[in-house]
Amino acid sequence: MDLLPFDEYVASLARKRMSAGVLFRDTTGRVLLVEPSYKPHWDIPGGAVDADEPPWATAVREVREEVGIDRPLGRLLVIDHVSADGRMPEGIAFVFDGGLVTDQQVRSLSLTDPEIVSAGLHTLDEAAAKVKPALAARLAVAVEAADRGELALCEDGKRVTG
């Protein structure tokens, strides 16, 4: 078997896109969603990981840019392998715990990023009607992981079991 030269081998390695989002909840279990100006589906605060940026730094940066929340990031709740869908290549989505927010805090969010039209707290059922199905599934797993104090592994939003 012939081995590739190291530089060719490295160039042949798969590249995965990555995103990092943050789960904020209120005491009743509603989750914070943002309404983007550039796509039809709502999302959680977060975004694409830039080159040479760790996912946790992305999460902090995106939350600060999108909703003006600047606080320490909680623990990692979900790592989700997202399959290629024809338009987008496969990727990895990280969801971190942002902690609790109140109605008053959400009403007073600083939405200065032109990418974000609005933000609000929604039950998981309400969220499922606003976000893509894979994100709805990922959100349900993230809430469960936060409640249980665990890290969940998913494939396309569905928990992977043992």
Image: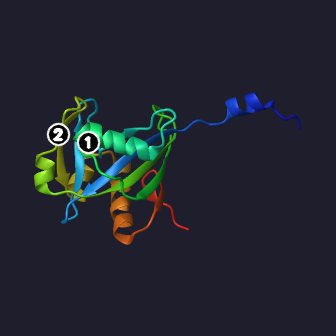
At 37% across and 39% down in the image, what residue appears?
A: 47
> Farthest right residue?
1
At 38% across and 61% down in the image, what residue appears?
A: 141
Q: Residues within 10 Å of mark 2 (few under 14, many from 20)?
A: some
State yes or no: discs 2 and 1 in contact (Cβ < 8 Å): no
Q: In this picture, is 109 found above or below 75?
A: above
For the residue labelled by badge 2, is the local secondary structure a helix, a strand or a loop?
Answer: loop
Question: Disc 1 marks which residue?
Answer: 42
Could you say where residue 15 lies in the image, as x and y percent from the top left? Answer: 58, 35
Q: CA distance from mark 2 to mark 1?
A: 18 Å
Amino acid type, residue under disc 2 in the picture: Ser
Q: In this picture, is 35 found above or below 144?
A: above
Front in this rendered view, residue 33 or 67:
67
Q: Is residue 103 left or right of residue 147?
A: left
Could you say where residue 118 lies in the image, as x and y percent from the top left? Answer: 17, 39
Could you say where residue 2 lies in the image, as x and y percent from the top left? Answer: 88, 34
Question: Is the N terminus in the top left, top right, bottom left or bottom right quadrant?
Answer: top right
Q: Residues within 10 Å of mark 1 (few under 14, many from 20)?
A: many
At 46% across and 62% down in the image, what residue appears?
A: 152
Front in this rendered view, residue 155 or 62:
62
Picture quadrant where residue 78 is located: bottom left
Question: Disc 2 marks which residue?
Answer: 110
For the residue labelled by badge 1, is the local secondary structure a helix, a strand or a loop?
Answer: loop
Foreground mark, 2 or 1, reads: 2
Q: Is residue 152 left or right of residue 117?
A: right
Question: Is the C terminus in the top left, top right, bottom left or bottom right quadrant?
Answer: bottom right
Amino acid type, residue under disc 1 in the picture: Trp
Q: Which badge, 2 or 1, comes first in the chain's sequence?
A: 1
